């Protein structure tokens, strides 16, 4: 039976006071890499894919690190205060708190962007965890600059200038999606699609061709910036952005298994 993991916290201060980052840390075999889950924009660590990964980790005796960015899920803070830099700092704080020696990062949508940035930052550390694999699900690197800003309408530009944010209807729930001027500005400072991305580990990308939010051509563009790595791209012909159907979950877990035990895929 899958063991329930209690909620725990670590603290971070982004300069406007301490905030609690909520985490669920599953212990596991230290001879294998820990799984680290990076959620998407507005998502949390209790989503379908994260729960499926945690169940898989329990079955395989793998450690797993799940957390909510500030302003998300069970963490403190306001969503509207969030930026890529803040959520990257949250991610690194959670990893630092758990202190794994070896990791495989799984990032969904915006979590794919944050995963790439986290790898860049962790590789600068002589004592950082060894990154043994990267799984990116419908990754959205540089989405603020590449996917949001080019399509801004006059009314949205006016809202950004007048109010500091604009809203758009969401197909995933009744609440509108909010994008702030600070998020867009900060996104430019965190671009990864402006040069070679060196991860130093195998990378597996799973992308739906029917994704309404991140076109599959964006995944192809990302691959062009990963020329030095062992990169596999799986295009799911009828896949959407969530990639949460049973077949999608099975595909995700197979990719994780191949990263944990490369001999399986040989």
Image (tube, helix red, strand yellow):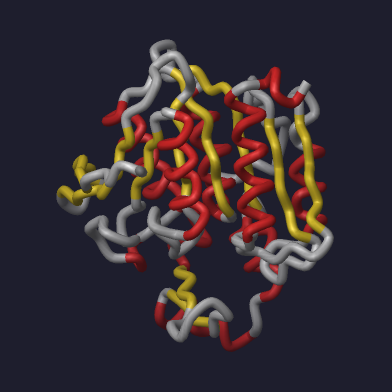
> How far across and down, in percent of the image, does residue 250 sit?
64, 48
Q: Is residue 222 left or right of residue 243?
A: right
Q: Is residue 189 left or right of residue 216?
A: left
Residue furthest front in the image: 1
Q: Is residue 81 above or below residue 103?
A: below
Q: Is residue 239 left or right of residue 58?
A: right
The quarter of the rendered structure image containing the C terminus is top right
> How far across and down, in percent of the image, does residue 206 sit?
71, 48
Using the image as rendered, state which of residue 97 and residue 113 is in the foreground.
97
Q: Which residue is at a point 25% across and 48% down the rendered structure image?
A: 21
Q: Which residue is at a point 80% across and 61% down the rendered structure image?
A: 209
Q: Which residue is at a point 37% across and 37% down the rendered structure image?
A: 65
Q: Is residue 22 above or below residue 48?
A: above
Residue 233 in view: yes
Using the image as rendered, state which of residue 164 and residue 253 is in the foreground.
253
Q: How many marks?
A: 0
The quarter of the rendered structure image containing the N terminus is top left
Q: Which residue is at a point 81% across and 47% down the rendered structure image?
A: 220
Using the image as rendered, state which of residue 248 and residue 71 is in the foreground.
248
> How far across and down, in percent of the image, does residue 193 sit?
69, 43
Residue 157 in view: no
> How far across and down, in percent of the image, does residue 29 sit?
40, 20
Q: Is residue 199 above or below residue 114?
A: above
Q: Is residue 16 above or below residue 3?
A: below
Residue furthest top in the image: 126
């Amino acid at each position: 039976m899958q063991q329930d993991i209690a909620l725990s916290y670590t603290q971070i201060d982004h300069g406007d006071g301490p905030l609690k980052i909520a985490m669920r840390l599953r212990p596991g075999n230290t001879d294998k890499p820990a799984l680290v889950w990076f959620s998407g924009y507005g998502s949390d660590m209790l989503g379908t894919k994260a729960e499926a990964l945690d169940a898989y980790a329990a079955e395989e005796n793998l450690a797993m690190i799940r957390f909510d960015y500030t302003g998300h899920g069970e963490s403190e803070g306001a969503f509207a205060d969030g930026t890529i830099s803040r959520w990257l700092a949250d991610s690194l704080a959670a990893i630092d708190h758990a202190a794994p020696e070896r990791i495989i990062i799984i990032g969904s949508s915006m979590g794919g962007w944050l995963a790439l940035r986290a790898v860049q930052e962790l590789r600068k550390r002589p004592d950082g965890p060894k990154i043994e694999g990267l799984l990116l699900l419908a990754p959205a690197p540089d989405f603020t600059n590449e996917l949001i800003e080019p399509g801004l309408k006059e009314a949205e530009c006016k809202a950004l200038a007048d109010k500091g944010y604009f809203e758009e209807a969401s197909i995933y729930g009744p609440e509108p999606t909010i994008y702030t001027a600070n998020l867009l500005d900060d996104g430019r400072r965190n671009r990864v699609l402006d040069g070679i991305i060196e991860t130093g580990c195998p990378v597996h990308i799973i992308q739906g061709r029917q994704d309404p939010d991140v076109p599959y051509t964006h995944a192809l563009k990302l691959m062009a910036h990963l020329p030095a790595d062992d990169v596999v791209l799986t295009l799911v012909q009828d896949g959407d952005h969530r990639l949460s159907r049973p077949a999608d979950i099975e595909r995700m877990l197979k990719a994780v298994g191949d990263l944990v035990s490369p001999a399986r895929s040989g």
